[in-house]
Structures are given as C-alpha cells and as structure tokens.
Image (tube, helix red, strand yellow):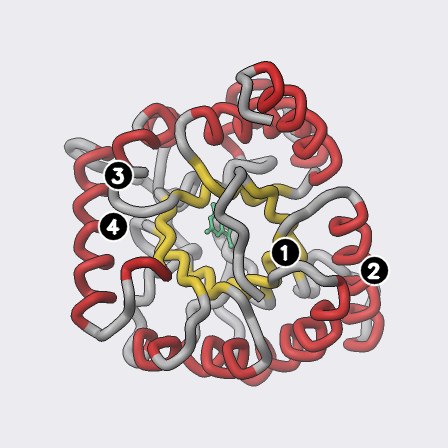
C-alpha cells in the first residue's frame, strides 16, 4: 500500500514488546497490539509503525526469531485496517519477512548499516526510513558528543542516501530521520528540530519526538504518559519545519492539533 505524499501524516506507534504489554503470553501480546492498532487508525493514524524490539535508551537486542514471532502475526492481521504499515527493525531477516508480508515501509533506527540490510529491501518497492543514531540503544545516552550536530547528522544521512543509491535503491523510496533522542542531548535535539528545513533538502523527513526525554526535560514531566501536550507541540513544530511524517503515541491529540494548525496556516 503506497504512502500518501500530499499532506503531513500522523504515524501511530504499535509496540509488540513484553515491556509494553506485560501481561503474559504471546497470544495476549498480539491481541493487545491489534486492538491498539485498530484504535490508532480509528483516531486518525494515516500509517502505523510496528516494532518488536525496544530501542529505548538502555534496551538490549532481542534474538531474530523472537522479533519475527512478535511482529509477523500482527503485521499480517493489521493489513485489514486499510492503512500502510511500517515495520521498525534493524535486522535484515526481519526486513525480508516484513517486505514479503506487505510492509509499506521499513523503519531502521540503525540506518541500514547491518550487513545485508540493503539486499533485504532492494527488490521491493517499499519505502525506507534511514535514521541517525550515535552509538547503540544500550549506551547511546551516556555521553553524546558532536562538534556540529546538524552538520554531522546531515553528512551521515547524505552518506547513507548515497549508499542506498549505490546498492540500486531508488532515491524516491527514501525517507530520513535525525533520530531525536538517539545519542543526543537536549541541546542536540533542539538544534536538529530547528534544522529540519535544511535536512529536508536531502529527502522527505520522518520525525519522532513523542513522549521522549527531551519533552520531559522541557516540561518537567517525569512520566512519559504526562508528556502529551509537549509532544503535540513538538510534532507541530516538526511539521512546520518540513516533516512529512510525525511518529506519535497520542494520535487523536496530534491529528486534531494538526487539523487546526494546517487550517490556520492555509494548508488544510
Ligand atoms: C523506533 N523508533 C523510536 N523512536 C524513533 C524515531 O524517533 N524515529 C524513527 N524513525 N523510529 C523510531
């Protein structure tokens, strides 16, 4: 299913991980994830992002079989909801299976740097989101450091776009993401948010700021679920600065805010 390109899209987050659905067996995890996906589409999500491995700061990798067992049954079932589905994974084997099962996008926080990642997605037409991350989820927030965060993230993304094209992947399939919170301090994140118009010259931008620590730091809200208003404000700023997709937890609130903001900007 193609990803609409005529308006900013709200992407709803569907985690199929034990830390998000802690009540036990696999069937329950899948049923809960499916219910959640349905609720996000009813709330106005134009695209879903399905992930079976947590990428939160401090999280550890999961084996490929476990990730496949979490994601694939849900991916097959959510097709009936009628919106394109992205799969968030760093693993080429999961990418291959997701593409075969009809994923509209592969969202790789590791920027397709794993051996075999380009080959896993090359012979499909699904969109690819290349994200920037300094380090790895386990340790990335320990002491992130840049001389010039915007220039370094821009150079990384330009380099990965060139690598995709060299691997035979059409540029029109590519999205980029500066990776808010992935090896970045609050100041780095704010600099990147301000620099989205510059990054958007490379490729369409996907931005994920929802409920992240930077929102907590700016609002004083310790609990992620209390960061809704701050997250909506960040999503609006990202769209204003050129993001084509905003990846969010709070779909209904973001969709409403975006409707008002777009109408007031004469873009409805
Ligand atoms: C999986 N995931 C978590 N945060 C993300 C972000 O900011 N961007 C993208 N593309 N994926 C993310």
Q: Earlier in the sequence, mark 4 or mark 3?
A: 4
The residue sitting at 66% across, 64% down in the picture is 17
Q: Position of residue 196 (x, y in %)?
A: 34, 32
Find disc 4 in the rendering and name its residue. 157
Which quadrant would the C terminus be assigned to in this image?
Answer: top right
Q: Residue 145, labelled with which disc?
A: none
Q: Position of residue 229 (x, y in %)?
A: 66, 23
Of circles 3 and 2, the one toward us is: 3
**Left or right of 172, for residue 247:** right
Find disc 1 in the rendering and name its residue. 48
Location of residue 202 (image quadrant): top left
Q: Label 4, label 2: how many angstroms apart (C-alpha)?
A: 35 Å
Tell me the crowding category of disc 2: few under 14, some 14 to 19, or many 20 or more residues within 10 angstroms, Cα based: few
Q: Earlier in the sequence, mark 1 or mark 2?
A: 2
Location of residue 180 (image quadrant): top left
Find disc 2 in the rendering and name its residue. 35
Q: Earlier in the sequence, mark 3 or mark 2?
A: 2
Q: Earlier in the sequence, mark 1 or mark 3?
A: 1
Q: Label 1, label 3: how many angstroms apart (C-alpha)?
A: 25 Å
Q: Earlier in the sequence, mark 1 or mark 4?
A: 1
């Amino acid at each position: 299913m193609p990803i609409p390109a005529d308006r900013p899209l709200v992407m709803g987050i569907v985690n199929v991980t034990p830390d998000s659905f802690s009540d036990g067996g696999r069937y329950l995890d899948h049923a809960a994830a499916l219910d959640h996906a349905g609720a996000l589409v009813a709330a106005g999500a134009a695209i879903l992002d399905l992930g079976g491995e947590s990428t939160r700061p401090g999280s550890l990798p999961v084996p490929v079989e476990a990730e496949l067992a979490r994601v694939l049954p849900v991916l097959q079932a959510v097709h009936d909801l009628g919106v394109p589905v992205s799969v968030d994974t760093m693993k080429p084997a999961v990418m291959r299976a997701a593409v075969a099962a009809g994923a509209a996008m592969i969202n790789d926080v590791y920027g397709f740097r794993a051996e075999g990642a380009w080959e896993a997605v090359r012979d499909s037409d699904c969109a690819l989101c290349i994200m920037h991350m300094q380090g790895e989820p386990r340790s990335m927030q320990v002491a992130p450091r840049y001389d010039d965060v915007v220039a370094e993230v821009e150079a990384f993304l330009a380099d990965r776009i060139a690598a995709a094209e060299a691997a035979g992947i059409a540029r029109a399939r590519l999205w980029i993401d500066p990776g808010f919170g992935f090896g970045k301090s609050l100041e780095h994140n704010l600099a990147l948010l301000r620099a989205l118009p510059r990054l958007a010259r490379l490729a369409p931008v996907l931005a994920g700021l929802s409920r992240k620590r930077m929102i907590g730091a700016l609002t004083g809200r310790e609990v992620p679920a209390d960061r809704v208003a701050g997250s909506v404000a960040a999503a609006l700023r990202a769209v204003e600065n050129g993001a084509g997709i905003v990846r969010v937890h709070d779909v209904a609130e973001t969709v409403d805010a975006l409707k008002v903001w777009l109408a007031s900007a004469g873009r409805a």
